[in-house]
Amino acid sequence: MELLTWITIGFIMTGCSLLICMKKGMESKLASITIAGEDEKSQREAQLLIWWIVSTTVWGVVSIMLIVLWFNLYFG
């Protein structure tokens, strides 16, 4: 297996494990935001939640691009 294969596998596995580890914390932040209303702490938690969603989306897009590149190089 070449370097691209290991980079792809490592990137996807690391991202999945981080996503699973952080999921419960983000769910609790969302619950506290909906209960607390609009105060300073809930606004900060809302920003963190939005950045978590953005970073998860970017991770997914990069993972898909790495998989497509890998298939293109090995099967194309």
Image: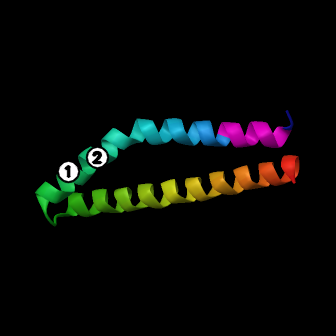
Q: Quadrant of the N terminus?
A: top right
Label 2, residues with CA under 10 Å away: few <14, some 14-19, many ≥20: few
Q: Residue at x 86, y 46 (%)?
A: 74
Indicate how the structure is coloured in the image.
rainbow
Q: Secondary structure at mark 1?
A: helix
Name the side, left or right, on which 41 lies relative to 60.
left
- The part of the chain drawn in magenta is 3-10
Cβ–Cβ below 8 Å for labels 2 and 1?
A: yes
Residue 30 lies, in percent from the top left, at 25, 53
Name the side, left or right, on which 39 lies relative to 4.
left
Give the residue number, with chain letter if any, for mark 2.
Answer: 27
Q: Residue at x 57, y 53 (%)?
A: 59
Type of the residue with mark 2: Glu
Residue 6 lies, in percent from the top left, at 76, 36
Type of the residue with mark 1: Ala
Give the residue number, with chain letter if any, for mark 1.
Answer: 31
Residue 3 lies, in percent from the top left, at 84, 39
Q: CA distance from mark 2 to mark 1?
A: 6 Å
Query: Which of the 4 image quadrants contains residue 44?
Result: bottom left
Q: How would you classify the magenta stretch by its main secondary structure?
A: helix
Q: Residue at x 81, y 43 (%)?
A: 4
Q: Residue furthest bottom?
A: 38
Query: Which of the 4 image quadrants contains residue 12?
Result: top right
Taking depth in this image into account, of 22 and 2 the one nearest to the observer is: 2
Residue 35 included in the magenta stretch of the image: no
Name the side, left or right, on which 75 lies relative to 51.
right
